[in-house]
Image: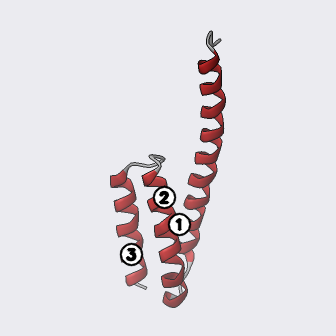
Amino acid sequence: MANHKSAIKRIRSNETRHLRNKYQHKTTRNAIKDLREIEVKKDAEEKLSGIISMIDKLAKNNVIHNNKAANLKSNLTKHVAGL
């Protein structure tokens, strides 16, 4: 158990941050899965910009690595272009 007030606060804030990151990451993964299931190019193009924004936010907050974000965006863009 933590012995300092600051360590106790750090445990609380880490838990809060963990839950928020987990929620945002899961939401983004679900959005990516939904995008891959879309078969109409126009609909996919509309959703793509929002999903790219979600991926960028995850990378900015170090929830996912920058290279993973770049790979996801690249693969999704290729997928939508190929529809």
Indicate the amino acid at tag 2.
Lys
Q: Which residue is drawn at 54% across and 73% down?
A: 35
Asked if residue 30 is positioned above or below residue 20 in the image, the reply reads below
The mark that comes first in sequence, 3 or 1, is: 1
Using a 10 Å C-alpha cutoff, classify the residue at mark 1 as few (fewer than 14 neighbours), some (14 to 19) or many (20 or more). many
Label 3: which residue? 77
Asked if residue 80 is positioned above or below residue 72 in the image, the reply reads below
Using a 10 Å C-alpha cutoff, classify the residue at mark 2 as few (fewer than 14 neighbours), some (14 to 19) or many (20 or more). some
Mark linked to residue 32: 1
Q: Which of marks 1 and 2 is in front?
A: 2
Q: Which residue is drawn at 39% across and 67% down?
A: 73
Front-lying residue, 45 or 61: 61
The local secondary structure at tag 2 comes to helix
For the residues bearing labels 3 and 1, Cβ distance under 8 angstroms = no
Indicate the amino acid at tag 3.
Thr
The local secondary structure at tag 3 comes to helix
Using a 10 Å C-alpha cutoff, classify the residue at mark 3 as few (fewer than 14 neighbours), some (14 to 19) or many (20 or more). some
Indicate the amino acid at tag 1.
Ile
Q: Is residue 1 left or right of residue 79?
A: right
How many labels, in total?
3
Report x, y in % for residue 48: 48, 76
Cα distance, mark 1 to mark 2?
14 Å
The residue sitting at the front extreme is 5
Q: Residue at x 41, y 76 (%)?
A: 79
